[in-house]
Structure formats: structure tokens, C-alpha cells
Image (cartoon, rainbow, N blue to C red):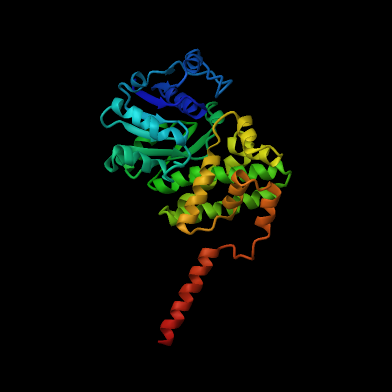
Amino acid sequence: MSKIAMIGAGSWATALAQVLAQKDYSAVLWARRQELADLINDGENSRYLPGIPLHAKVTADTDLERVLQGAEAVVFGVPSHCFRDLLKKALPFLQPGAQIINVAKGLEESTLLRLSQVFAQEVGEAALDRYTVLSGPSHAEEVGRNIPTAVVAASRNLATAEYVQDLFMSTNFRIYTNPDVTGVELSGALKNIIALGTGIADGLEYGDNTKAAMMTRGLAEITRLGFSMGAELLTFAGLAGVGDLIVTCTSMHSRNRRCGIEIGRGKTLEEAVESVKMVVEGVRTTRVAWQLAKQQGVEMPITEQIYRVLFENCSPRTAVMHLMGRGKKLEMEEIVSEKISCTMDQGREEKQ
């Protein structure tokens, strides 16, 4: 019976531990607080994943060294802003060659880095061959109840992605592989911004038309930024892209959507985050994406307006007015611009 270490004991880490335990792995969660570890060891994470009886092979401990001892793989299921610190703390106890699986959906706010880049800084570029990001449309509340779910394991090393595929794959949890780590990481992080926006629209009591527009144009700007940073376009049309965007923007399981709803109803950012009672990754990610868009010279109007609502005291209704009042646009701006440019270049060549 192989041991898998789970760094973090929130809803997603607990749900994934449940998946592994059902496949006869020993899944050991690291918890910061003894009371949370005790809850898990008593058979239910009632704080973060209530109502789901845990498999006997799911256990928890507050001692990081004990959790990591003998683990063939380590799953980092902590908020993105905690990743670097916990990675540093874990490094002395990792088994040589242990597989690293990151399931956080965020970016590092202080550096604007993707989490695989943070990992490379701390462990070394070569270690990325044993690094995988697991992402896609996957609410913990459903995975923990064995509701059919499909996600993506992305690694630059195909054998590493296939290891993670084999590790987690079951009749209820399907894994696809993808070599585009950049695209999968950016998809998972940036969709949380759009979910905040659709939540705000719901809080304002706008309709399905508004939500559909927000999601579709949100995907367009996520794709623009991702492509500018080296991601593959097709990734954004897959599970990690449009799949995760749909589930996060439409479900009440989504912390980001719930936070947005409260902001749309008039709560301050602080009040809205407090009402969710868990980390809302999209708040930090909005700040990062706003900076990345400026850095990359990419237009992200929805992200810009959500940034203004969150951090510049812009009212949600004013933000919507700014979005709706923008100048006329072609829907496929980049494609049409590229065709026009190619046509002009061809015309010049013919004249010469």
C-alpha cells in the first residue's frame, strides 16, 4: 500500500485524499491545526467537506516530517499564496525523486509567477520533470461524493503526467494529460476572476444573457493573455479552460461566484470574503492579472473593471456601464487583424 502525502487539509485536498484511499493508497493530510486533524481522524472533515464520511485510509497529522516520510508523491493542496513557504518547509523531508502534484489555482501575487515557476525557483529547473498541475472543472463537494468528474494532468514530461493519470484515475474520476503547463495553470487561475464577475452580475440581479456574455468574453481575454505568455490556444477550449470556467461561473459551490454575488448585493470586499469563510483565490489573482495584462500589452476589459470594483471602490453598476459603453469591436479581433495584416503585406509584395 503506497503512501501519498497531501499538504493541506481543505476541501479539495480532502476530496482528493478520498479518491486515493478508494484506490487503496494511504492518503495522509497535513493540517496546520490539531483540531482539524482530529476531525479528519474521527472520520469527517466537517470544517471544509461536511457530510462526507471519509475512508479509513484517509488520515491527518500536524507533523510535516511524519506526513512526508516515505511518500512516493506529494500533493500540494494549499492556497497559492502559501505554496512557496510550504514548499520550502517540505523540501528537507521529500523522498528523492518524489512526484510533486500541485492542485492550487492561483498565481503568486508578489512575483506574478505561475506556481510551476515558483517550484522551479525553489527546487531547480530540472525538477520540473517530476512536477504536475492537476486542474479542471472539479468541485470538491462533488468529487468527494464520487460524482463523475474529468480533469487534466499537465506536465512537461509525459511520463510524469501519465503517472498522475494512473494515480488518480477511477470510474468516477477521469484524467486527461496535457503538455501545456502554462495554459493549464493560467486557465485555472484566471477563470476565478470571471467567476467573481458573473457572481457580481447575479448579485445585481442581471440575467442569463449577462452571464453568457461575461463568460464568453472572459474566455476571450483569458486566451489573449495566455497566448501572449506562451500557452497553447487549444488548452483554453478544453477542460482546464472553458470546462473550469463554466463550472466556476455557474455553481454555488464556487467560492469566487459566491463572493461576487455578495459584492453585487452591496457588501464590501472584506465583508464578501468573510461571508465565504474560505480562501477566495480570484481576489489576489485579479490584482496579478491586471498587472500581467499591462506588462504583456494585452487588453482585458472585464478583468480591469473587476479590479476597479475590488480595489478602487468602483460601483458594480458603473463597471458594467463601462463595459457596455466600450467602442465597437470585431468579435474575433486577433484573427481579423491578422488577416488584414497578411492581406496588406501581400498587396505590398504584389505592387513591388
Residue located 42% across and 25% down the image: 20
* Residue 73 visible in the current orientation: no
Q: In the rendered image of this protein, does residue 4 appear above or below residue 247?
A: above
Asked if residue 68 lies left or right of residue 318, the reply is left
Q: Which sits in the foreground, 106 or 162?
A: 106
Residue located 30% across and 30% down the image: 98
Q: In the rendered image of this protein, does residue 303 appear above or below residue 15?
A: below
Asked if residue 44 lies left or right of residue 133, the reply is right
Q: Position of residue 313 (x, y in %)?
A: 64, 45
Q: In the rendered image of this protein, does residue 255 appear above or below residue 32?
A: below
Direction right: furthest residue: 205
Asked if residue 239 lies left or right of residue 162, the reply is right
* Residue 289 visible in the current orientation: yes
Q: In the rendered image of this protein, does residue 272 appear above or below residue 191?
A: above
Q: Position of residue 71 (x, y in %)?
A: 33, 24
Q: Position of residue 77 (x, y in %)?
A: 45, 31
The quadrant of the picture occupied by the N terminus is: top left
The quadrant of the picture occupied by the C terminus is: bottom left
Asked if residue 141 lies left or right of residue 175, the reply is right
Q: Position of residue 236 (x, y in %)?
A: 49, 50
Direction bottom: furthest residue: 351
Q: Which sits in the foreground, 324 or 315?
A: 315
Q: How many marks?
A: 0
Q: Which sits in the foreground, 268 or 3?
A: 268
